[in-house]
Image (cartoon, grey):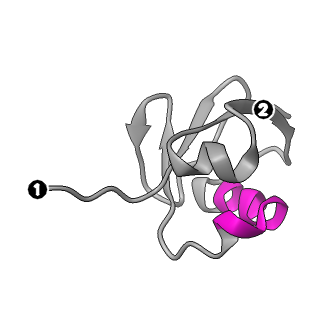
């Protein structure tokens, strides 16, 4: 299945892309897509924390992604 993946903040710089469409297995989970993207982009793989939102909501790692879902990757943020 195909899903749209968007990259924000420093992840946009690491990938050189705002977004892309990835072909993944049916039934892939949030953890699975996170691992898939880490396998493609070494700089993201080096980050201990990678935040993933599905359709605008941060979800559990075991949530199954469906075709047509928008998946967004964010680096951890801090501020004060």
Judge left or right: residue 39 versus residue 48. Answer: right
For image coordinates 64% across by 76% down, the residue present is 46
Q: Is residue 69 above or below residue 10?
A: above
* Disc 1 secondary structure class: loop
Frontmost of labels 1 and 2 is 1
Q: Which mark is residue 20?
A: 2
For image coordinates 43% across by 56% down, the residue present is 60
Q: Which residues are magenta?
A: 32-44
Q: Position of residue 31 (x, y in %)?
A: 61, 62
| Upstream in sequence: badge 1 or badge 2 | 2
**Displayed quadrant of residue 79:** bottom left
Disc 2 crowd rating (10 Å Cα; few below 14, some 14-19, many 20+) is few
Q: Position of residue 48 (x, y in %)?
A: 51, 76
- Foreground of the two, 9 or 31: 9
Q: Is residue 31 above or below residue 27?
A: below
Q: Is residue 28 visible?
A: no
- Magenta segment's dominant SS is helix
Q: Is residue 73 visible?
A: yes
Q: Position of residue 53 (x, y in %)?
A: 47, 42
Tell whether label 2 touches label 1 (CB within 8 Å). Answer: no
Disc 1 crowd rating (10 Å Cα; few below 14, some 14-19, many 20+) is few
Q: Position of residue 11 (x, y in %)?
A: 60, 50
The image shows a total of numbered marks equal to 2
**Which quarter of the rendered picture does the C terminus lie within?**
bottom left
Distance Cα–Cα, label 1 vs label 2? 32 Å
Q: Can you name the residue that lies furthest to the left here?
A: 80
Q: Which residue is mark 1?
A: 80
**Which quarter of the rendered picture does the N terminus lie within?**
top right
**Displayed quadrant of residue 6:** top right
Q: Is residue 1 above or below residue 64?
A: above
């Amino acid at each position: 299945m195909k899903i749209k993946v968007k990259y924000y903040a420093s992840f946009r710089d690491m990938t050189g892309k705002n977004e892309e469409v990835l072909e993944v297995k049916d039934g892939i989970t949030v953890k699975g897509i996170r691992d898939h993207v880490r396998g493609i982009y070494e700089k993201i793989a080096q980050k201990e924390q990678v935040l993933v939102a599905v359709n605008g909501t941060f979800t559990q790692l075991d949530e199954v992604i469906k075709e047509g879902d928008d998946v967004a990757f964010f680096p951890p943020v801090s501020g004060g």
